[in-house]
Amino acid sequence: MQVRIGVQSVAKELVVETSLSADEVERAVNDAVAEEDGVFTLRSKNGARVVVPAAKLAYVEIDESETRSVGFGSY
């Protein structure tokens, strides 16, 4: 699943491929925003972590559609 994260005062959005479900991502956003100094953390499929202060989140777009990779790779 692909998640696009907009950060306030940053022109480019963050795009993360994650194995979490849409409900899990939504829950993580809600939990981060509910805390006073919350931090939204998302782990990508390759193990990298994306950490954004919840107060700086502009939007989080969750795309549940299956995306196909382009290029040479295993099928």
Image: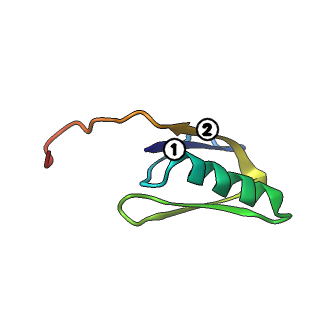
SS class, disc 1: strand
**Mark closer to the observer (2, 1):** 1
Q: What residue type is labelled 2?
A: Ala
Location of residue 51 in the rendering, given as x and y in whole percent from the top left corner: 60, 62
Determine the residue positioned at 28% across, 35% down.
Answer: 68
Determine the residue positioned at 36% across, 36% down.
Answer: 66
Q: What residue type is labelled 1?
A: Val
SS class, disc 2: loop
By what rule are the colours in the image chosen?
Answer: rainbow
**38 up-or-down from 3: above or below:** below
Q: Quadrant of the C terminus?
A: top left
The answer for how far apart the CA atoms under marks 2 and 1 are is 17 Å
Disc 2 designates what residue?
11
**65 up-or-down from 16: above or below:** above
Location of residue 37 in the rendering, given as x and y in whole percent from the top left corner: 81, 66
Disc 1 designates what residue?
3
Determine the residue positioned at 76% across, 64% down.
Answer: 38
Instruction: Determine crowd level at label 1: few under 14, some 14-19, many 20+ residues with C-alpha closer than 10 A.
Output: many
**25 up-or-down from 43: above or below:** above
Q: Quadrant of the N terminus?
A: top left
The disc label shown at residue 67, or none: none
Nearer to me, 68 or 10: 68
Q: Quadrant of residue 2?
A: top left
Location of residue 28 in the rendering, given as x and y in whole percent from the top left corner: 65, 57
Sequence-wise first label, 2 or 1: 1
Q: How many labels does the image show?
A: 2
The answer to whether residue 49 is left or right of residue 41 is: left
The answer to whether residue 72 is left or right of residue 39 is: left
